C-alpha cells in the first residue's frame, strides 16, 4: 500500500510531506512531479510502471470524493475524480474504489 500525490506546487508538497510524517501511519508517500499541472498523465504513467513491474497482480486505486451538501454543488466538485475514473475504467487488473467524505463545518 502507498499513497500517491501529484505535485503541482512544490511549496504545498513540502507541507504535505511534513504532515504525512505525522499522520501517514507508516504508509509511504509517493510524490509524482507534474511540470504541466496535469494530474492524469503522471498518475497513469506511475500505474503503468507499477503494473509492468507487478505483472498480473490486481491494483486497487482508492479515490476520495468530496460530498457537497446540496445536489447542485456536485457540478462544481469531483470533476478530477470523474476524469481519473473514466481513464481507469477499462484497464486490465485495475479496480477503482470511491470513498465519499463530508467536510466538517
Image (cartoon, rainbow, N blue to C red):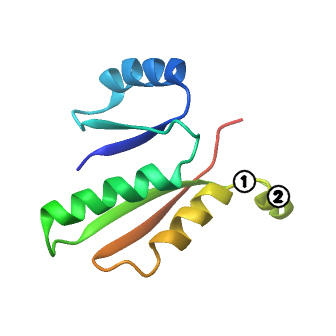
Q: Nearer the viewer, mark 1 or mark 2?
A: 1
Which circle marks residue 77 in the picture?
A: 1
Mark 1: few, some, or many residues within 10 Å (few <14, many ≥20)?
Answer: some
Residue lying farthest to the front in this orientation: 36
Q: Is residue 43 above or below residue 98?
A: above
* Mark 1 or mark 2: whose residue is earlier in sequence: 2
> Going 49% across and 39% down the picture, which residue do you hit?
34
- Tell me the quarter of the picture where residue 19 sits: top left
> Going 46% across and 25% down the picture, which residue do you hit?
13
Q: Is residue 56 above or below residue 32?
A: below
Q: In the rendered view, does 15 fall on the left or right side of 66?
A: left
Q: In the rendered view, does 100 fall on the left or right side of 78?
A: left
* SS assignment at label 1: loop
Q: Quadrant of the C terminus?
A: top right
Q: Is residue 30 above or below residue 49?
A: above
Q: Which residue is mark 2?
A: 70
Q: Position of residue 82 (x, y in %)?
A: 61, 65
- Tell me the quarter of the picture where residue 27 sits: top left
**Disc 1 versus disc 2: distance between alpha carbons?**
11 Å
Q: Position of residue 57 (x, y in %)?
A: 16, 71
Mark 2: few, some, or many residues within 10 Å (few <14, many ≥20)?
Answer: few
For the residue pair 22 and 89, the one nearer the viewer reads as 89
Q: In the rendered view, does 62 fall on the left or right side of 80?
A: left
* SS assignment at label 2: loop
Which circle marks residue 10 in the picture?
A: none
Q: Position of residue 33 (x, y in %)?
A: 43, 36
Q: Position of residue 93 (x, y in %)?
A: 27, 77
Amino acid at each position: 500500500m502507498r499513497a500517491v500525490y501529484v505535485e503541482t506546487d512544490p511549496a504545498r508538497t513540502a507541507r504535505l510531506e511534513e504532515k504525512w510524517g505525522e499522520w501517514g501511519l507508516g504508509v509511504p508517500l509517493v510524490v509524482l512531479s507534474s511540470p504541466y499541472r496535469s494530474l492524469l498523465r503522471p498518475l497513469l504513467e506511475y500505474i503503468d510502471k507499477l503494473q509492468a513491474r507487478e505483472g498480473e497482480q490486481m491494483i486497487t486505486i482508492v479515490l476520495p470524493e468530496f460530498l457537497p451538501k446540496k445536489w447542485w454543488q456536485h457540478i462544481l466538485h469531483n470533476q478530477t475524480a470523474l476524469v481519473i475514473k473514466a481513464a481507469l475504467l477499462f484497464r486490465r487488473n485495475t479496480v477503482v474504489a470511491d470513498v465519499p467524505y463530508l467536510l466538517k463545518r
